[in-house]
Amino acid sequence: MQFICRLGTPEGEILEEVHEASDERALREELAKKGVHLFEVRAKGVLGRLRIPSLRRANQRLPPRELMIFNQELAALIRSGLPMLQALNLILPRQRDPEFRNVVTQIRDKVSSGEDLSQAVSDFGELFPPLYSATLKAGERSGEMEQVIRRFVRHLGLILETRKRIASALVYPVTLIGLSFGLILVMMVFVLPKFTDFFSNLQVELPLLTRITMGFSLFVKENIFVILFVLGGAGLALTQFARSVKGGMAIARWKLRVPFLGHVFHQSAISEFCRSLSTLLAGGIPLVTSLEVAVRAISNPYLKSKLEPVIQRVNEGQPLAETLDATGVTSDIVIDMVQVGEATGELDAMLSDLSDFLDEEVEVRLDRALSLLEPVMLVLMGFIVATLLISVYLPLFSLLGQIEG
């Protein structure tokens, strides 16, 4: 079986190669013997990509809210002293999402056959967050499964709350843009063409602005289906481009450069990385392993590629603060707090405080960006609508002037 592997060489290079092995575990063992660091692996071909076709969503993840509730119930049942298999049997009928229930059923069956919960979860690949399987493994090794699961629930709740705040803040500007473009489209397709017929019957010379506006509105009206088809095709092409490796990297890099919001996206991703790393370290997972999982959990591919070399360098013995500074994607406050955490031996607590600080900074910057963005959009949309209205009324004013003269 062939696998596409993203590798880190001892020289610090990041390569993507195709390797053959009987299964993923054998491949990892073979590469580890060669001293090569494995960042990511996926099966090559259609069958590999469709490993669990009936269970994969477009975003390749299970519903976060369902996952959080499931783990809250699991932690409560474990605390009461129930064995893992019995706890899963009690939780299974309570799952309302059919996809999630199907996944829990398969996990229950794997645990019933003797697999550990962490291994059963990791068999589902990207359906679960990378952090989840690693934290479960830490709980199994330490015997503190309940505390580990509750720590993951707290981590997931904070991540969801941050994303919810960002989405709520963006609702108003997105709605404003949608309504404004809808109003402009209605004027172009239904209102302005009627004035075109009216002005043609008057047989008067129209101002340049009116001729341009009327010509554009007639073009939109006569070719509306072609325009919609072209826009739909462009959207589909952009979606396919975004799903490719180069396309996803380009869009991820562009998001970080968006005026007003680019810094918000950047800080949010770094905060997610710090919170994941803090949760893993608090669970007793070694630093290098924690870095592997935390880097994989970053949602921005560009930042992920920039932080991947950190794993190899820390594995070679370099300090984490120094390697993060070398990437150029973390701020001075991140470097300073990580350095203090390493010096005091409380890196997990310092990273937790750091992620809280970054979340607050994201919220402040988001509010500030939207406070500037909203009036800019209002002025821009008002200018467009005013231009359309002026182009309509200019000939009328001219005609009234001729009549009065």
Image (cartoon, grey):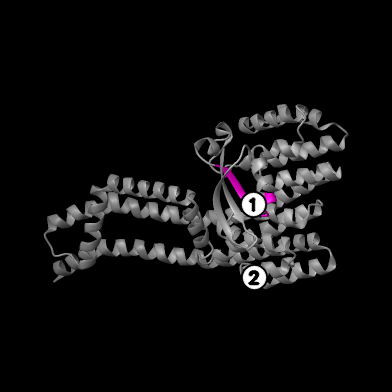
Q: Would residue 397 be visible to someone looking at this image?
A: no
Residue 219 % position (x, y):
23, 53
Foreground residue among 170 and 273: 273
Residue 99 % position (x, y):
61, 32
Foreground residue among 81 and 304: 304
**Amino acid type, label 1:** Leu
| On-image quarter of the N terminus | top right
Residue 4 % position (x, y):
55, 46
Instruction: Choose mark 2 or mark 1, whichever is in front.
Output: 1
**Amino acid type, label 2:** Ala
Question: Is 42 part of what is drawn in magenta?
Answer: yes
Residue projecting furthest to the left: 203
Between the C-alphas of marks 2 and 1, the distance is 21 Å
Question: Is 310 part of what is drawn in magenta?
Answer: no
Q: Are marks 2 and 1 in contact (CB under 8 Å)?
A: no
Q: Secondary structure at mark 2?
A: helix
Name the residue: 39% across, 51% down: 182
The answer to which of marks 2 and 1 sits earlier in the sequence is 1
Asked if 313 appears above or below 97 in the picture, the reply is below
Q: How many marks?
A: 2
Q: Which residue is mark 2?
A: 326
Q: Secondary structure at mark 1?
A: strand
Name the residue: 27% across, 52% down: 220
| Extent of the magenta region | 32-43
The mark found on residue 38 in the picture is 1
- The local crowd at label 2, few if under 14, some if 14 to 19, many if 20 or more residues have their Cα within 10 Å, is some
Q: Would residue 85 be visible to someone looking at this image?
A: yes
Name the residue: 70% across, 56% down: 291
Q: Quadrant of residue 265?
A: bottom right
Name the residue: 49% across, 57% down: 251
